Amino acid sequence: MKPAMMRAQASLTRRLLLWVLAALLLVWAGFVAVGYRTGIHEAGELTDGHLAGTAALMLNLDLPPFVDAARETVRPAIPTLKSHDYQPSLSVLVRGADGRLLARSGDAPVPPFNEHSGFADLELGTPPATWRSFSQWDGLHARQVTVLVRADERDEMAADVAGQLAEPGLWLLPVVALALGAAIWRGLRPLQVLSRDVAELEVDKAERLEARHPYREFNSVVRSINTLVGQQQASLERERQLASEVAHELRTPLSSIALQAASLRGELSPAAREQALAQIGADAMRAGHVIAQLLALARASRADLQQQMQRLDLGALAGRVVAGYAQASWESGHTLSVQGEEGLEVLAHPLLLELALRNLVDNALQHTARGTFVCVQWGHDADAAWLQVCDDGQARPGAVAPSAERLGLGHKIVGRVMDVHGGRFTQPAAPAPFTRCYRMVLPLTP
């Protein structure tokens, strides 16, 4: 892949990092929100507890009335503390059973007398301000103590406590994000090394990936890539062999045509001239047959996958193919026949299977002597159907078996068609009276 194209593609490392950071940010925001709300709630409870504790302390002390406001001791200013940090400005009111104010401390306005005990939010002063209060009677119901604190001071303290709980999370988020980014990048380095090794792999040199990656998750990837490389090398080797076979098949007729054409330029008798022309025609037909087989082989390699497999009756297919060779077999002096079970069906590509059968019949007609009996047979075994072409050509006087090279191209076409169908191409023992059979084995139709 070109470097520019690689740069244009998305990065798995960047994508993984972004997703992890997004998830971290979402969870962290939830933690901060919960911490902030928890801080406000706890600070409120802390203040309410302070009010209740002060009221209980005042009720249990037998003290004279508070000093005058002019002589009150103010709260000391502590530089390290804010005005609200755990020392809120409390105001205390002491009333008798009749509601008469007995004592007062602090700057809170005096609220109306209320016999109820407990917490309350009061609007006091001019302009009105909210105060948080707690009231409690003593055991004899003779004295009531009310403790007040400004609500805004209470809320400010709650917000500050909540902020201090959430602040460490905000400071830690960038640190954790950087640590996660470094960990993800470091953890994906073996994948980056494997990707670089794959990019540097040169298939045409039959190289393989080395199993030097220490993680078992990569083993299947390395095995799969090496398997693909092996298949590619095998395919290239088959193509080289095919090219050699085609060149060999074409060399003889083309050389013959060239020789016969050269002889026509010389002084030839009419009979020799006719013989040379006939040889040129035969050689041209042979070369055309090789080219037709080569085109058929290319077609079989593409597998015609656009056409779905169909149920095919093997008897109908055999009858149609044999009928198409009736004229050719009559001219070559061969006898063609069909034999098999009625109604036997398989799932197959119609054109490809017919192409393979035509190649077998064509080979039988071209490479056997006149008078040869050729039969197309079909049937089935326990788990597979079969379709074969048999002949008795080797039993004829003076018969010469065709070489493997002359049959190779047509048989390669049949073999590739069988690969498409998940079947196999074999040469079984021929039943009497035949001397040679070539069989295509196909899965049975469920």
Image (tube, helix red, strand yellow):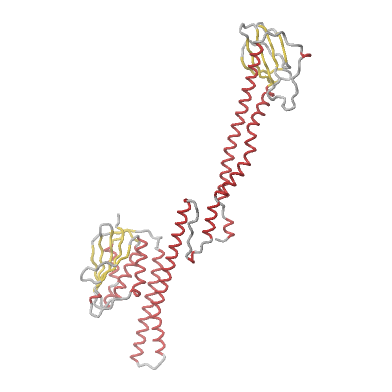
Query: Does residue 28 appear to the left or right of 209 in the view shown?
Result: right
Query: Does residue 59 appear to the left or right of 236 in the view shown?
Result: right
Relative to residue 205, is residue 211 depicted above or below? above
Residue under the image location 30 percent in, 62 percent down: 441
**294 and 204: which is toward the camera:** 204
Residue under the image location 39 percent in, 69 percent down: 297
Residue under the image location 62 percent in, 7 percent down: 141
Residue 271 is situated, as x and y percent measured from the top left of the image, at 33, 91
Q: Quadrant of residue 159?
A: top right
Residue 239 is situated, as x and y percent measured from the top left of the image, at 42, 69
Relative to residue 295, is residue 419 depicted above or below? above
Residue 43 is situated, as x and y percent measured from the top left of the image, at 63, 25
User: Residue placed farthest to the left in the image?
Assistant: 432
Quadrant of the frame with the N terminus: bottom right
Q: Quadrant of residue 155?
A: top right
Residue under the image location 33 percent in, 70 percent down: 359
**327 and 442: which is toward the camera:** 442
User: Residue placed farthest to the right in the image?
Assistant: 70
Quadrant of the frame with the C terminus: bottom left
Query: Does residue 75 appear to the left or right of 292 in the view shown?
Result: right
Residue 98 is situated, as x and y percent measured from the top left of the image, at 66, 5
Relative to residue 380, is residue 368 depicted above or below? below
Q: Quadrant of residue 145?
A: top right
Query: Does residue 50 appear to the left or right of 440 in the view shown?
Result: right
